Amino acid sequence: MPCLCLRMVCVVGRLIVIEGLDGSGKQTLARSLATDARSAGIRVATLAFPRYGVGVHADLIRDALYGRLGDLTDSVHGMALLFALDRRDALPDIHQALDQHDVLLLDRYISANAAYAAARLGAPDIPNDIAAWVRELEVTRFGLPQPDLQILLDTDPGTAALRARNRARAEAGRALDRFEADAALQQRTSAMYAALATQEYLSPWRVLQPGPDGHVEATPDLLTDVE
């Protein structure tokens, strides 16, 4: 297995990310892949961003998304910075997981910040360069490792929105946040995810499209067949 030395830390595991809209099925896919991979003898660690209840910056994100921090959500760059700081706080855990496992499987990572921030500024209809700004901030300045592979779960935005609403009704105290409740934002973010995948932003991408029943064809090989 190749070894990449990053800031004196030897990273031996593969960093694989599942990206997609709120309600796209990322958690379900991550759980299924991790379970199947472990059954096949692959050492897998998992982590989801934002780390609500774990990191102070993640909890500030949650407060902002529910309107408890005034007009903070009006600032695209301010929110993007909070998301990036949550990942920066998790950097020691990321390095440790990569050092001790074959695969670190993440539910969202840097590209989520790029996709949502770009969409909030009007992309893809209104082009902007915030994806480059996010990369400079998170990779160059904060030293976050780039993924080996990103998996886009390309769920229809309407289907994802319905799932998010059903989840909000089913879970006590789990109302839709400002991003989840913005249907137009979710549509633009879906388009931005597709654009980032086409550009191979940060890494190679694999695009998975759920079937009519929501099932996704994915096997543990997806976590190991990384060029």
Image: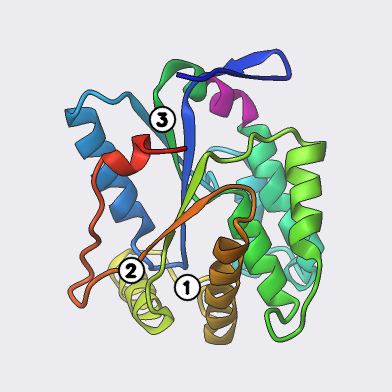
In the rendered image, residue 61 lying in the magenta stretch gets the answer no
Identify the residue at horizontal 25%, vertical 61% (top origin): 216
Foreground label between 3 and 1? 3
SS at circle 1:
loop
The answer to whether residue 143 is above or below residue 26 is above
SS at circle 2:
loop
In this figure, which residue is indicated by the disc labeled 1?
176
First in residue order: circle 3 vs circle 1 = 3
Q: Is residue 155 left or right of residue 74?
A: left
Where residue 170 appears, as percent x and y from the top left, is 28, 69
Image coloring type: rainbow
Where residue 191 appears, as percent x and y from the top left, is 56, 77
Q: CA distance from mark 2 to mark 1?
A: 24 Å
Q: Residues within 10 Å of mark 1 (few under 14, many from 20)?
A: some
Residue 49 visible in the picture: yes
Where residue 221 appears, as percent x and y from the top left, is 28, 40
First in residue order: circle 2 vs circle 1 = 1
In this figure, which residue is indicated by the disc labeled 2?
209
Q: Tell me the tag on residue 194.
A: none
Q: Is residue 101 left or right of residue 149?
A: left
Q: Is residue 129 left or right of residue 179?
A: right
In this figure, which residue is indicated by the disc labeled 3?
103
Q: Which residues are magenta?
A: 91-96
Q: Main secondary structure of the magenta part?
A: helix
In the rendered image, residue 94 lying in the magenta stretch gets the answer yes
User: Residue 205 or 103: which is nearer the viewer?
Assistant: 205
Image marks 3 and 1: residues in contact by CB distance under 8 Å: no
